[in-house]
Image: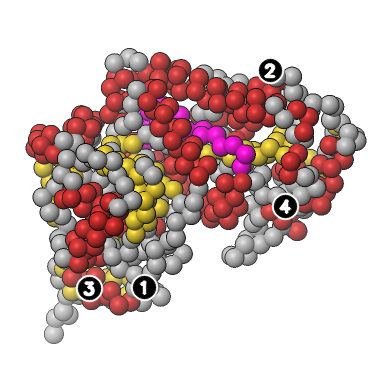
Amino acid sequence: MAERPKQEHIHVQLPGGETLPFAGRRRLLEISKVVQHRYATPIVAALVNNELYELTATLEPPAVVQFLDLTAKEGRRIYRRSLIFLLIDAVHELFPKATITIEHSLGKGLYCEIKKETPLSAADIPVIEEKMRQIVTADRPIRKRKVSLAEAKQVFNRQGFLDKVALIKYWPKDYLSLYRINKMEDTLHGYLVPRTGILDRFGLKYYQPGLILKFPDERDPSRVAPFVEQKKLFGIFREAESWGSILGFETLDAMNRLIEEGQGPEVVRVAEALHEKKIAQIADMISARGDKIKVILIAGPSSSGKTTFAQRLRIQLLVNGLRALPISVDDYFVDRDQTPLDESNNPDFEHIEAIDLPLFNEHLLRLVRGEVVELPTFNFNTGKREYRGKPIRLDMNQPLIIEGIHGLNETLTRSIPRPNKFKIYISALTALNVDRHTRIHTTDTRLLRRMIRDAQFRGNSALETIAQWPSVRRGEECNIFSLQEEADVMFNSALVYELAVIKKQATHLLQQIDRSQEEYIIAKRLLTFLSFFYPLEATEVPSNSILREFIGQSCFF
């Protein structure tokens, strides 16, 4: 008797490691309904053979499927994007002539502005939220269709999305995917959920002059994350918006046009001048406090440009007659065998107790008293501190500059009274939007910066940088973001032109990641995102720019 041929299956990998086979051609949405009870939160998309798929897709066996719910990073990204689309559609239904701009993250939510015939008020918020919930209750399908670029232009022109019309010129494909809930069609340059009924976890809050769209909590997606007030951070984003007005654009199409017309060097010069002016203002704030400031602390997440900022601030302080002296927290690491361990039992070098806090504070106190102190040097090869004859003593009008992730944490410098410290928070807070409905994520900008730097100076591939990024982000959440409002001042290190400069190099690095690797999903998303930027040559970037810390040829290193 002849052996029966083996039937090919779609294999669904379930939480806990179990694999469930499905025979024949199947829609992902159909399969997701069968296995939804195995997931804690709604299934929103799937990885099929390590490629991101929407639930509306139909699969042919053989295939390996991993469904994504709100516990997965890409699942959360799709859910949030879909909530944005829900908000846009609700506003469009209520106020057909209004424009809505998705601005930036704030307080575990997303800050948005709505311009309509009468200014947005607190009374409008429950009306908009009720309309959103009506659409959710109706469980409307979110339909998708592919159209030619010519038809996409017609659709966007008809709806008044002129920024999207202008951006089509830079779209790398000959078609565009449009989504529709009711009558309005839009693209948010990424996948969405298949139906509005999934989108029941959100909230709105009036935040003058706009509103906050609140998302499911990352740690507990069953509830909406509470809003966390961040007045200083909001202020720095508003400053970035005013800088955009000075430069003459708020969205990517306008910047592309200026670069394409040969005005890129002017954009660079104005952006760099704005940075220099802000650094000079911070130096003036420190100088105005006279000899009261003994320690200047600079903190910020990875790839925010802390090292270059510290050098430029030192120079501006010199202009004001203050000879600030930098010292490195890294030289105060405890011996490697004493380093705290993380939840995986690996050394946690970002834990504050990875620093010898008693010794560090003893040296700080002695230095501000005018005593001579021999600074240590940490030998990263041996994992031990060494003393190589580096005695220093502070003179009058000579504050210390300390740069590191724990700078805002009072525990780091507990021996120095708070009035004698000046704390600076620095991050690359991107204010430029792809278009009014699609923002540029700050974390993406920092990841691309780190990728370029790691490839040039640390011998790491893009794959390695992306693989390390979740661990870096966890350290930031624990050690930095919760303390950022403690800063005396914030500095936005983002440069509106920087992605146009790093596009070529970043694209080359990302293209080396193939679809067999887990990091491919992020690489593909970043490649699509970078394709919108009209390139700008790095020769236009001055040698003291924060961007030079990542692309090389900095005058400080």
* N-term mark: 3 or 4: 3
Give the position of the C terminus as an image quadrant: top right
Front disc: 1 or 4? 4
> In the image, 444: left or right of 157?
right
- The picture places residue 409, in percent across and down from the top left corner, at 67, 49
Front disc: 2 or 1? 2
Vertical side of 319 occupied by 112: above or below: below
Stretch in magenta = 487-507
Residue at 29 percent across and 44 percent down: it is: 120
Residue 494 located within the stretch drawn in magenta = yes
Please name the amino acid that badge 4 sits on. Thr
Give the position of the N terminus as an image quadrant: bottom left
Specify few, some or many for label 1: CA neighbours under 10 Å numbering under 14, 14-19, or 20 or more.
few
Please name the amino acid that badge 3 sits on. Lys
Judging by the rendered image, the residue that carries numbered circle 1 is 40
Specify few, some or many for label 4: CA neighbours under 10 Å numbering under 14, 14-19, or 20 or more.
some
Judging by the rendered image, the residue that carries numbered circle 2 is 319
Judging by the rendered image, the residue that carries numbered circle 4 is 411
Judging by the rendered image, the residue that carries numbered circle 3 is 33
- Identify the disc placed on residue 183: none
* N-term mark: 2 or 4: 2
Vertical side of 293 occupied by 1: above or below: below
Residue at 14 percent across and 47 percent down: it is: 184
